[in-house]
Amino acid sequence: MLADGTGWRALAFMLVEFTLGLAAFIVSVTLLATSLGGATYWFWSRWLPLQQGADGVWRRATEILPGIYVEGWRWDLAYAVVGLILLFVWARATLGLGHAFRGTVTALLGPTRTAARLTEVERTRQEVVTDADLRLRQIERDLHDGTQARLVAVAMQLGEARDQLERGGDAEHARVLVGTAHDSTKEAMTELRAIARGIRPASLDSGLAVALETLAARSALPVALDVDAEVRASPEVEAIAYYAVAELLANASRHAGANRAVVEVRVTDDGRTGSGASGDAHLVLTVRDDGVGGAAIVPADERPAGTGGTGLRGIVARAAAVDGHLELVSPAGGPTVATVTLPISAAR
């Protein structure tokens, strides 16, 4: 029990809440009673008891200072004005005390930083798992509907060509079938390479700079790349950075109608080392395009059913999995500037 931090925080809350509650009650009631009393003094002062002043005169009024009595319309007006002012002060003071209570509850009864961090990790982990499952399903569909169908067609064409040759049929027709099968095989190989790049580009083995150069060369729009060839990070972070840039360039081409894009990669906090394991160093990727703008990160609970964690939300989920984040500035009419900040190492 002595080591129960949550219990000690709850005990501290009770002590603070008692003191704060008592002070809030006194301040609030005093201000409210004083403001209402002053604002209505003109009405209830007629029922005050008679009292004789030092000058021997009997008055039905309050004495605020020796020989100074609150009577007459001027004093009634002054008291009414002061009462209304205090009524406003009472409202603001009560609101401030409410904020103080809320701050106390948040600080002493709210989740700790560790608990909040755990909740965020669980959320991002679930999004990454969902995104990975969707990608696997997409790969399965691509293989089933594309590559597998082509290979089945190749097998059928080669089988027909074999039957033609075994029966001594038309050799020219068999040659055409073999040629068609050969072309289909090359197309299937191209599709397989594209799918393999989607899983993990082989160019990443040569570093992020080389991978981004390859990506820029294959992009549908001209890309100006500014990245230091010595920039290295952990393999997981480099993969996230690569896919983030790939998604942003794809969005610029498909949705923004951009004519060109600029990709910049920097390392902050002097983290440019060969191992990429420098303390608090971060990898900062900036992608700019001259498109129509209007891009937005749609919250997870507002995504259309079946869209999963793809697009910008997918970048957010991937980055959050390693304590990174995405900043997006995309006013209507453009340009769009997306900045992805990632730690150099995923082990933090």
Image (tube, grey):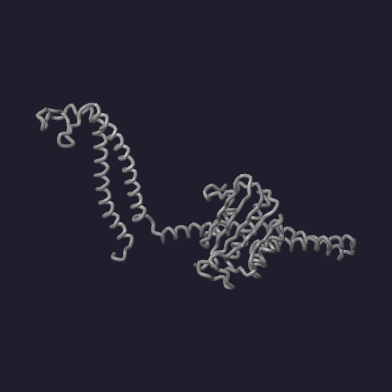
Placement of 302 over or under 54, stated as above or below: below
Residue at position x 55%, y 66% in the image: 344
Q: With 312 as the anchor, is 169 left or right in this view?
A: right
Q: Is residue 73 visible?
A: yes
Q: Nearer the viewer, residue 169 or 141?
A: 141
Q: With 85 as the anchor, is 143 left or right in this view?
A: right
Rendered location of residue 343, percent (x, y): 54, 64
Placement of 15 over or under 1, stated as above or below: above
Rendered location of residue 157, percent (x, y): 80, 60
Q: Nearer the viewer, residue 309 or 226?
A: 226
Rendering quarter of residue 241: bottom right
Rendered location of residue 129, percent (x, y): 54, 59
Label count reads 0
Rendering quarter of residue 243: bottom right
Placement of 46 over or under 221, stated as above or below: above
Residue at position x 53%, y 70% in the image: 278
Q: Nearer the viewer, residue 111 or 180?
A: 111
Residue at position x 11%, y 31% in the image: 53
Q: Quadrant of the N terminus?
A: bottom left
